[in-house]
Image: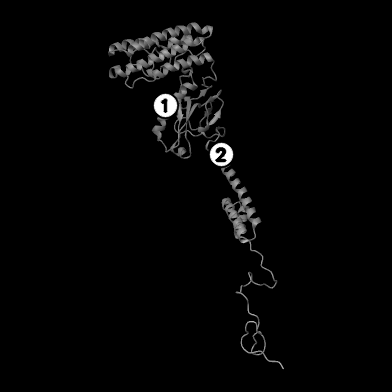
Amino acid sequence: MSIPPPSGPRQPGGAPEQHPQGQYPAPRPQGPYAPPPFPQNPYGHRPPPRFNGLAIASLVLGLLWFVPVVGLVLGIVALGQIRRRGEQGRGMAIGGIVMSSVSLVAWVVLTALLAVFWDELDEVSVTDGTGVHALADGDCFDSPGGLVGWATEADRVPCEGEHDGEVFGTVRLPDGPYPGDDSLFDTADERCYGLEDAYAMDGWALPADVDVYHLTPSRDSWDHGDRVITCVFGNQDENGTLTGSLRRDETTLDADQVVYLKSTHVINAALDRAPGSEAVEDDLPGHREWAREISEALAGQSGMLRDHAWPAAAEEPVADLVGVLEKAEAAWAKAAEADDVDTFYAHYDRGWELIDPEQSVPAREALDLATTPPVFDGDDGGDGAGDGRADEDRIEV
């Protein structure tokens, strides 16, 4: 006969616990319940990873060449997200980066080309009839608007025929606010006069009807980047023309002519620095200082002529001129030391007589240079000595 197991919970080492209906209960779980990492689906496997949205946006922007910097940045960010999240779209992100990089380079190149294009438009070739500030030294041109006022149009033409103007120099101004009409005029007047001697070294060779014009930026053209003053030779008659080039510099003269003309520039520069007061009585110290500068300039001129090896035909006339210049130097030096107005005038007048332009005609003739002294407004064409001279600072020797 068998004995039934006792009722109640199973003791250690005893029989298993019985269900009230005589069945054994299901085993209890041995640890905390954890749900599956992915929801179950009818097919029995996890869903495919989703595409990264930034990768798609990067590819679209790259294909459209629209805001390439944004497309490039989105592609780089997308690659990082894809790596961390296990998403799809790596190829799209790489494609977006490549296409955005190409479009970015294209934008840079296009911008550079446009900058060059607009710069060329700002300096339109004068062969097309516009852009006076595109003219260069030595260019001869016709200006439909004339040379007075703010001329803006010009047609480059050969210098051999008739033309309105010839460019002998250009001045580029610094950036900044518009300096004003008066300031521009003063700057142009000063700078163009300085460039004239370098281009037309022999002032005697300039025709009497030639005048200096300067074409300056207007307020409107300044706002569009115009910073060029164009220095021009033109006819004194606004309706007149020039014929032939007025260029007389190292490109058209021989070495002997250049040395001679450079020596004359030394004394002419000193003559240009005459005191503002024409009367010696009003400023004796200023005139004495000016006389000293002329004396030193004459010494420099005679030294340049003395030290150069001249052609045989020019040796004697140049030597004679040097002798005259040395006497003139002494006269101006004495004027510089004068204690009173009368003494100053005595040496001053003697100095003017000795730098009479006619003194240099034989040397000029031997060097095949112009031999007719220029006559300026108010000048009687004489020797430049005495009082009451008009434009005595423009006498050229």
Residues 274 and 231: in front is: 274
Mark 1 packing: few (<14 Cα in 10 Å), some, or many (20+)?
few
Q: Residues within 10 Å of mark 2 (few under 14, many from 20)?
A: few
- Amino acid type of the residue tagged 1 in the rendering: Glu
**Disc 2: which residue:** 116
Seen as rendered, the residue at the extreme bottom is 1
Direction from residue 12 to residue 258 in the image, left or right = left
- In terms of sequence position, does the residue under pointer 1 or pointer 2 come before the other? 2
Residue 215 picture location, percent across and down: 46, 31
Q: Is residue 340 left or right of residue 354?
A: left
Q: Nearer the viewer, residue 34 or 278?
A: 34
Tag of residue 353: none
Where residue 51 sits in the image (x, y, percent)? 63, 61
| Kind of element beneath mark 2 | helix
Element assignment for label 1 = helix
The picture places residue 247, in percent across and down from the top left corner, at: 52, 21
Q: CA distance from mark 1 to mark 2?
A: 32 Å
On the picture, is 201 further left or further right than 291? Answer: right
- Counting from the top left corner in percent of width and height, residue 364 is at 48, 11
Point out the residue furthest to the right here: 1
Q: From the viewer's perspective, is the residue at label 1 or at label 2 nearer? A: 2
Residue type at tag 2: Val
Q: Residue at x 54, y 31 (%)?
A: 155
Kindly identify which residue carries mark 1. Answer: 190
Q: Is residue 227 visible?
A: yes
Nearer-the-camera pick, 307 or 321: 307
